[in-house]
Image (cartoon, rainbow, N blue to C red):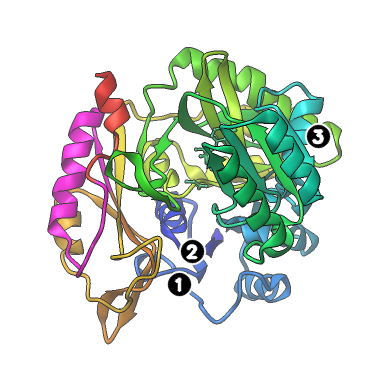
Amino acid sequence: MKILVIGGGGREHTLAWKLAQSPQAEKIYAIPGNPGMAKIAECENGISIEDNEAVVAFAKEKGVELVVVGPEVPLTNGLVDAMNGAGIRAFGPTRAAAELEGSKSFAKDIMQRYGIPTAKYRVFTDAASARDYVQAEGAPIVIKADGLAAGKGVVVAQTVDEALTAVNNIMEGQSFGAAGARVVIEECMFGEEASLLAFTDGETIVPMVSSQDHKRAYDGDKGPNTGGMGTYAPAPVMTKELVQEATEKILRPIIAAMKKEGRPYKGCLYAGLMITEAGPKVVEFNARFGDPETQVVLPLLKSDLLEIMLACCDGRLAEQDIQWSDGAAVCVVMASDGYPGGYPKGLPIKGVEQAEAGGALVFHAGTAERDGRLVTAGGRVLGVVARAADIRSAVDDAYAAVGCIHFHGAQYRHDIAHRALERL
Ligand code: AMP
Ligand code: GLY
């Protein structure tokens, strides 16, 4: 079977790597892909992933039978609808179902109506009323731009002043455009966060192994928010009982609700959870695999990912027996100097082969090839992943592999999985 992966980051490299292991995978294409993916896939970077018509034409021309959509933008842009319209299977939610990520107010409203645990909230389209609400509620309080903001539209304000500034910036500044015309203001939840990704065919939902991301740039969870500086799986905070509780109180009800609302949700559902004293509550839903969660979750999947994805598309997930390995995986993201602010590009990267020879998986994100040499080309450059029998060994192996890789100014966190290690 010919498969097309949409996207070119670490998540998509991991998806392509896992799909390539299926005996049914005949050929993999990627738009745009990256130099790491180019070893297992034919990469096409002359087509925009936001141009549904061009992507459908490419899939038809190549005889693609399954399209796997990585990032949120093509999902909220209706790429899955366009593929289905052309008679091509696509793994991921339709535009209507991807609203669960595309609009925070939609997600909050549906959770409220169906009794799914999440923070108390209000939605505002008018800045003066939003400011009044902040004054009345006090701090800490959380201010969120409604639309997609590439993970930058959330402010956890510790003081009323900070919250008012956030309301003004999001609603009256220009930084978020249409995404900031509406804000969600919600109660601040306390606890440890975990990511629970799940496969779903719109009826059945099966959680994957849990994981935990590290969103702040620097050690000790300090510094600015990033796309994610590292992950580990499974997350010990998500005990078997908590996974069960989250499945019963969150995953199953949201899938039933989406179906009832006429927006059946298929694909990967990402539940960002806060484990509060009152149990797991939803911080956010994403309509896609997490990045860099995927880099640690899929290496622990023993079953055939292609078969699972086809079963999700065809409504046969209940028949699948999905197996996970007992071990642990750790991903350390190596980023460019200055990320998440401005950073240089085009710096040579050395040592990837040595890291791989030692058993690590090196997933590319912001890399490019120039004159046959691998160079940096983005903020998050590589995801260096180790699998081992337990978290402690996976951490040691991942950092040993990071030690093999060099580019000028490489920046990474030294404390990935600290929460898991503290629990041991
Ligand atoms: P989001 O983009 O919704 O995942 O928010 C980004 C980050 O902000 C989350 O990973 C949390 O760390 C934090 N956050 C969001 N909502 C809340 C909340 N209601 N209470 C506490 N922290 C939150
Ligand atoms: N790792 C966070 C995300 O994928 O949204």
Query: Marks 1 and 2: CB-CB under 8 Å?
Result: yes
Query: Marks 3 and 1: CB-CB under 8 Å?
Result: no
Distance from disc 3 to disc 1, alpha carbons, whole Å, reads 36 Å
Q: Which element type, helix, strand or loop, lies under badge 1?
A: strand
Q: Is residue 4 left or right of residue 404?
A: right
Query: Marks 3 and 2: CB-CB under 8 Å?
Result: no
Disc 1 marks which amino acid?
Answer: Glu
Residue placed furthest toward the bottom: 371
Q: Which of these two is toward me, 191 or 326?
A: 191
Q: Which numbered disc flags the more N-terminal residue, 1 or 2?
A: 2
Q: Which element type, helix, strand or loop, lies under badge 3?
A: helix
Image-quadrant location for residue 403 = bottom left
Q: Residue at x 52, y 27 (%)?
A: 274
Q: Is residue 295 visible?
A: yes
Q: Residue at x 27, y 43 (%)?
A: 219
Residue located beneath label 2 in the image: 28
Disc 2 marks which amino acid?
Answer: Ile
Q: Quadrant of the N terminus?
A: bottom right
Disc 3 marks which amino acid?
Answer: Lys
Distance from disc 1 to disc 2, alpha carbons, whole Å, reads 6 Å
| Residue 20, percent from left and from top | 42, 55
Q: Is residue 84 above or below residue 241?
A: below
In this view, the mark in front (3 or 1): 3
Q: Is residue 119 left or right of residue 240?
A: right
Image-quadrant location for residue 163 = top right
Mark 3, other Cα within 10 Å: few <14 / some 14–19 / many ≥20: some
- Where are the magenta residues, as a range? 385-413
Kindly identify which numbered label has been placed on residue 42: 1
Distance from disc 3 to disc 2, alpha carbons, whole Å, reads 31 Å
Q: Quadrant of the C terminus?
A: top left
Kindly identify which numbered label has been placed on residue 259: 3
